[in-house]
Image (cartoon, rainbow, N blue to C red):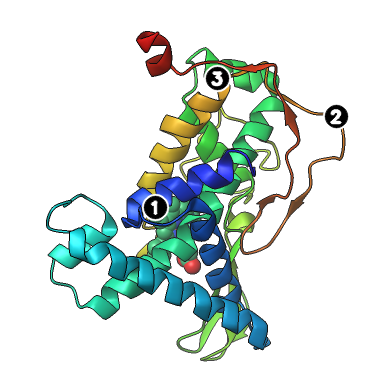
Amino acid sequence: MQDFALPFSAECLKSITGLTNIRYQDMNAWSQSMIDGIANYVGDPAVEARCHAATAGIDTAIDDMLPGFSKHADKSLLCVMVASGMPMASVRANIKLAISGGQNEPRDAIAGTVWALLTHPEQLELVRSGKIRWLQAFEEYARWIAPIGMSPRRIAKPWTIRDVAFEANDRVFLMFGSANRDEKYFDNPDRFDVRRDASKSVAFGAGPHFCAGAWASRAMVADVALPTIFSRFKNLRVADGPAVRIGGWAFRGLLNLPLKWDDILPSRSQSSRQ
Ligand code: HEM
């Protein structure tokens, strides 16, 4: 998680946002500080201060990038939003939203899918042989252990669902993780099975707040991270030692992933240059 999934996720987020001027460590730390700030329901001043420091750091990084824009126009969020004439306050808010929403989930999905496949070797073989796509393995992992397990909402108007009455302004948690194990939609839902149809999964949410990074994540995880890890880490396996722990509600995933491998093989582009 620390050696690959975290830096990979943060480097991708640098390209996606356009903040290529920062270190991946800052991207990761700022994302976490904003997440903690958003969930600071008890109003801890230290948490709030770290969140403000993160947003100030992001604003400085945005300011640093702006002067070079006309020369380096690209398809990053920052470039596209600035070029569209969007007010700078909205540009800044959207960049911050992407950073708080785009770091932990791909990290957790990469580590989690690697672990799920290594502990279900017959399913790993199906993917390695090309019978099942890496994308399907990723989607099934995200159904099985949804990287966003739940999301809070405020009730807009009085409503009753299955005899439970809600008043306006009540706070509720939408449990994506529970929906993804609904027996009405998934047979044997507690089982990780790359062969199943995971299309009813709500791992990326649903409706107006559907994940803005869904397709970027599919490319990151299924087109790049998983094939790279499984082709370059020779004899990759789960190491003996402390058992894997899974935790978190809003952001849910593996808390540790001890792995071993025998060698790191050169990438295809490296070997063709030799
Ligand atoms: C495995 C990867 C990912 C998963 C499983 C995931 C999951 C989700 C979910 C469930 C939501 C809806 C939350 C809600 O309804 O309250 C969401 C929203 C969002 N996600 Fe992702 N996400 C992933 C990656 C990313 C990435 C890489 C980015 C940015 C580059 C991103 C940006 C966003 C944004 C901006 C929203 C808010 C959309 C809105 O409110 O309109 N996500 N994501």
Q: Indicate the position of residue 97 as horizontal and vertical percent values.
A: 41, 68
Which residue is denoted by mark 3 in the rendering?
232
Rounded to the nearest whole Å, what is the CA distance between mark 2 and mark 1?
Answer: 34 Å
Which residue is denoted by mark 1 in the rendering?
14
Left or right of 272, for residue 105: right
Please name the amino acid that badge 3 sits on. Arg
Q: Does the residue labelled 2 lie within 8 Å of ligand 1?
A: no
Left or right of 240, for residue 16: left
* Nearest to the observer: residue 225 or residue 196: 225
Which residue is denoted by mark 2 in the rendering?
240
At x 46% / y 56%, what residue is drawn? Answer: 102
Q: Indicate the position of residue 175 as horizontal and vertical percent values.
A: 61, 63
Ligand 1: image quarter: bottom left
Extreme right residue here? 241
**Which tag is nearer the camera, tag 2 or tag 1?**
1
Quadrant of the image occupied by residue 272: top left
Q: Indicate the position of residue 183 as horizontal and vertical percent values.
A: 64, 47
* Nearest to the observer: residue 222 or residue 20: 20
